[in-house]
Image: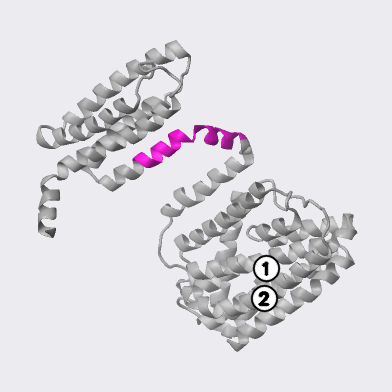
Amino acid sequence: MDGIARDFFADNLILMELAVALLLGALIGIERGWSAREREPGERVAGVRTHALIGLFGGVAALLSEVLTYWAFPLIFLAIAGIALAGYRASMEKSGDYSITGLIGLLLTFCFGALAVAVDVALATACAVVTALILDNKREIHELLHKLHANELDAALKLLLISVVVLPLLPNEDMGPGGVLNPYEIWWLVVLVASISFIGYFAVRLGGTAKGILFTGLFAGLSSSTALTLQYARQARREPQFAPMLAAGILLACGTMLPRLLLYAALVGPAMLPQLLAPLAAMGLALFLPALWLWRRHRHDLKAERPMSQNPLELRVALLIGALLATVMVLGEWLRAWLGDAGIYLLAATAGIADVHAIALSLGRMATNTITPATAVMGIVLAAAVNNLFKVVLTFSAGNARLTRCLVGPLLASATAGLAVAWLV
């Protein structure tokens, strides 16, 4: 029975591919017909039937190109394009609508039909579904453009520049002292940090500030817990009565930084992930539980300001992170050769004051070839602990005494718990 089924499908494969081409055209045609459902029959340039036939025509053109001549497909495509262009031009003159979306959709339908027959049915189906979704969400896409700010569009384009333009051009080979500098991998880590920051920015922007400090602190940790600490410290100085709630937001942001470090470890040094999980979990509990207690005890109706820069991504910042990563890797190799593990810990404690990203990513990569996963774990935990304790100094200098008192206990407990568990593990 299975052999008969296989023979049937083999003998009728072309018919099935043509049927798929027809159905894909009908799918796009249904969407186009729904969009123009208020018009009378005949007023539309192309509806369900036309798109279905165009999809089938694309499949037939692909077959003719294989059987007769390779000129068949381009000539038929030009003929279809000419007919469609004439029809849409007449419609534009009558309605005053100069959009060419329908024309492009019709030509894509022809190509999808050819794709289903000559290349791959699954690829053609995926392209047709995505096209139908884009055509169907015209209003939502236009609303998104109205909501998008100029600086956010600029940031998105810069992120694309450093990821899909610059990254493929960099050599993927080890260079420098001890072969620790790989331009491709260093820049990939820059793209990773920038992407997480970009996602964190929009998480806060879309969620809005109306949900208050709890929501804002939780999601701002994806972007910059240090920036949020500075923002809340200044706000606590202006409004001292809200210091406990602002402290809860800072603790949440510091705690949210820890899953981000686990993500870095999973991507660049998966071997150390099991050893890193326990100390970061201990640090997280020491931060989240006091934050929840502060929140429940000092709830007030306060809407937090947005704790982020006006530009979610700056190319200059990405370049500085890349330089810092390279510097940390070179220093890490020198200190490892000179002082062994003690040199790595010294570097982690020093680098953690300014930034945890660079040292976590650097140690994660070094754990794959030059240091043990246990050393990398202790270094990352040490950097995170120093970074959190530095926030006490930051709030003391920029905020007020009440905010500092709310933070010093949990942050100190978090650092102690993380280092103790990392040492035991």
Q: Position of residue 411 (x, y in %)?
A: 75, 74
Tag 1: amino acid: Gly
Give the class, few, some or many, for how many residues have Cα within 10 Å of label 1's Cα (few <14, many ≥20). Answer: many
Q: Position of residue 258 (x, y in %)?
A: 62, 69
> What colour scheme governs how the chains and residues are painted in the rendered image of this protein?
one colour
Q: Position of residue 329 (x, y in %)?
A: 54, 70
- Checking the image for residue 350, the label placed there is none
Q: Is residue 174 positioned above or below 152 on the image?
A: below
The part of the image, by quadrant, that contains residue 328 is bottom right
Residue in front for this viewpoint, 42 or 91? 42
Q: Is residue 63 positioned above or below 94 on the image?
A: below
User: How many numbered discs, if any?
Assistant: 2
Q: Position of residue 362 (x, y in %)?
A: 54, 70
Q: Is residue 342 positioned above or below 226 on the image?
A: below
348 left or right, relative to 251: left
Residue in front for this viewpoint, 336 or 89? 89
196 left or right, relative to 12: right
Residue in front for this viewpoint, 255 or 26? 26
State if disc 2 and disc 1 touch (CB < 8 Å).
yes
Tag 2: amino acid: Met
- The residue drawn where x is 85% and y is 59% is 242
Q: CA distance from mark 1 to mark 2?
A: 8 Å
121 left or right, relative to 310: left
Look at the numbered disc 1 and give the secondary structure of its residue.
Answer: helix
Q: Is residue 103 magenta?
A: no
> Which span is picked out in magenta?
128-146
- Checking the image for residue 255, the label placed there is 1
Q: Which residue is mark 2?
A: 283
Q: Is residue 138 visible?
A: yes
